């Protein structure tokens, strides 16, 4: 098994059954995990902020930082590997908040809402999710099986 | 109170903060000539090699090789010099894993460096100039965790139970152990003879409105880095974010998003340069 790490603001796609995609420490960031079970193509995006309008230069340099530039790119890259987007299984992870975050902040919630909206615009619904709360999450996707595991420090691992 | 006594004893055991760093801090603060600063640095072998390594790294892209601290100091300028000196000195305290907080080896260091970088980004966004005192306070804000780590590990289940019941991690530390990592950090900074602003900022980084301006700034830097998941252990999101502080500093929601973006960008750019040379596995 080979680990392919997805850094903050990055994405990876794969059709290699030997590979596992993983991203560490999702706080308010959101991990978008997609899998097409027939062609066994998977992808993962670790985005930070909902909207690229905040810093267009950064969006050009690193589109995965934002939901609106990252998600379409993730989907295109899956299609380029032969995935049928209509059969894509989508899972969302992350989008946590700090305790006491007032309406003023709530970046995690805004991120989740943005992801949902963009996926919906692409005709995709979320199959399962592990979002919100006050925890850090590490998520992995096994390309051979499509199995998605979420690890929370102090709480252990679960499949979603 | 037994745990508390043990903690206080542990603080005594912590090696002193390298005097060379305090000396450099002081000289830069006084705007002493580069030559004088270089003389102080040259005495420390570890620092000298670190500075030369960084001055010759591709990050600075200098055409010719720098072979003396004198030259390096001129090329790097005081901002980078101070960063290198402080980081290189602090690194030794952060090397082990901190299991009590469920942090992998080097993660607390990563978080600390990110916070220090964030302080630069924050000041820039507030149209204020780079501030060495704030940089040091941000870099060392979690130093108390190094001492508290062993005690948290022993009482971890109790703390988690309190956290799940709605307490912040810091409050739970205090309830279970009689003291929290911020207060311990304050003691340590005092023992190291740091200036009052740094002691205050470390001690109140979770209760910013009890502290002065630096405590507020460090609070913001800390929560933003935690929010990005940089070096975040089990406790990081179980901290209370005082968003009133943002308003006090005059930061809008848009500013906060821009800050997050810029902090991550700067962290990414400098990560390889100042890493602890550790594996990045699970």
Image (cartoon, rainbow, N blue to C red):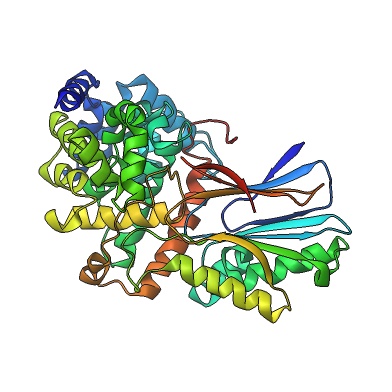
Point 34% across, 73% down: residue: A104
Q: Which quarter of the rendered picture does the N terminus of chain B lie within?
A: top left
Picture quadrant where residue A134 is located: bottom left
Q: Position of residue A74 (x, y in %)?
A: 72, 64
Point 60% across, 51% down: residue: A7
Q: Is residue B151 above or below residue A103?
A: above
Q: Which quarter of the rendered picture does the C terminus of chain B lie within?
A: top right
Q: Is residue A95 above or below residue B108?
A: below
Task: Using residue B169 as the reference point, say whether residue B9 is left or right of it.
Answer: left
Q: Position of residue B36 (x, y in %)?
A: 23, 33
Q: Is residue B119 visible?
A: no
Picture quadrant where residue A17 is located: top right
Q: Nearer the viewer, residue B158 or B221?
A: B158
Q: Nearer the viewer, residue B158 or A45?
A: B158
Please give the count of numbered marks on the rendered protein: 0
Task: Using residue A8 as the reference point, say whether residue B87 is left or right of it.
Answer: left
Q: Is residue B7 visible?
A: yes
Q: Position of residue A66 (x, y in %)?
A: 57, 68
Point 23% across, 65% down: residue: B245
Q: Is residue A11 above or below residue B185?
A: below
Task: Using residue A136 as the reference point, say whether residue B121 is left or right of it.
Answer: left
Q: Position of residue B165 (x, y in %)?
A: 32, 51
Q: Residue furthest bottom?
A: A121
Q: Nearer the viewer, residue A152 or B107?
A: A152
Q: Is residue B78 above or below residue B52?
A: below
Task: Using residue A124 as the reference point, say whether residue A152 is left or right of it.
Answer: left
């Amino acid at each position: 098994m080979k680990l392919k790490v997805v850094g903050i603001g990055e994405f990876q796609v794969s059709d290699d059954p030997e590979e596992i995609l993983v991203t560490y420490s999702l706080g308010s960031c959101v991990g978008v995990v997609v899998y097409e079970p027939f062609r066994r193509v998977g992808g993962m995006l670790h985005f930070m902020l909902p909207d690229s309008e905040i810093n267009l230069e950064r969006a050009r340099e690193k589109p995965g930082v934002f939901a609106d530039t990252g998600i379409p790119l993730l989907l295109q890259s899956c299609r380029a590997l032969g995935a049928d987007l209509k059969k894509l299984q989508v899972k969302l992870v992350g989008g946590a908040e700090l305790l006491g975050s007032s309406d003023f902040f709530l970046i995690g919630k805004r991120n989740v809402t943005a992801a949902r909206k963009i996926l919906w615009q692409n005709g995709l619904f979320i199959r399962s999710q592990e979002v919100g709360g006050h925890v850090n999450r590490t998520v992995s996707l096994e390309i051979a099986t499509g199995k998605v595991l979420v690890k929370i420090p102090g709480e252990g691992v679960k499949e979603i | 109170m037994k745990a508390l006594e043990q903690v206080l004893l542990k603080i005594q055991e912590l090696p002193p903060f390298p005097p060379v760093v305090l000396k450099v801090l002081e000289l830069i603060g006084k705007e002493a000539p580069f030559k004088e600063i270089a003389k102080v640095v040259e005495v420390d072998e570890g620092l000298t090699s670190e500075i030369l390594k960084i001055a010759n790294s591709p990050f600075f892209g200098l055409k010719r090789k720098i072979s003396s601290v004198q030259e390096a100091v001129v090329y790097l300028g005081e901002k980078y010099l101070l960063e290198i000196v402080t980081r290189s000195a602090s690194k030794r305290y952060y090397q082990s894993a901190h299991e009590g907080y469920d942090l992998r080896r080097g993660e607390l260091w990563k978080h600390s460096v990110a916070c220090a970088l964030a302080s630069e980004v924050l000041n820039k966004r507030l149209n204020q100039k780079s501030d060495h005192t704030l940089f040091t306070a941000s870099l060392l804000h979690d130093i108390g965790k190094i001492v508290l780590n062993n005690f948290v590990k022993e009482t971890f289940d109790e703390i988690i139970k309190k956290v799940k019941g709605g307490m912040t991690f810091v409050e739970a530390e205090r309830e279970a152990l009689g003291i929290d990592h911020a207060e311990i950090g304050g003691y340590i900074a005092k023992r190291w003879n740091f200036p009052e602003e740094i002691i205050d900022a470390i001690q109140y980084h979770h209760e910013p409105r009890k502290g002065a301006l630096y405590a507020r700034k460090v609070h913001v830097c800390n929560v933003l880095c935690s929010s990005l998941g940089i070096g975040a252990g089990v406790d990081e999101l179980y901290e209370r974010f005082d968003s009133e502080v943002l308003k006090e500093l005059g930061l809008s929601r848009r500013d906060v998003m821009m800050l997050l973006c810029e902090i991550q960008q700067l962290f990414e750019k400098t990560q390889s340069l100042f890493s602890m040379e550790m594996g990045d596995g699970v």
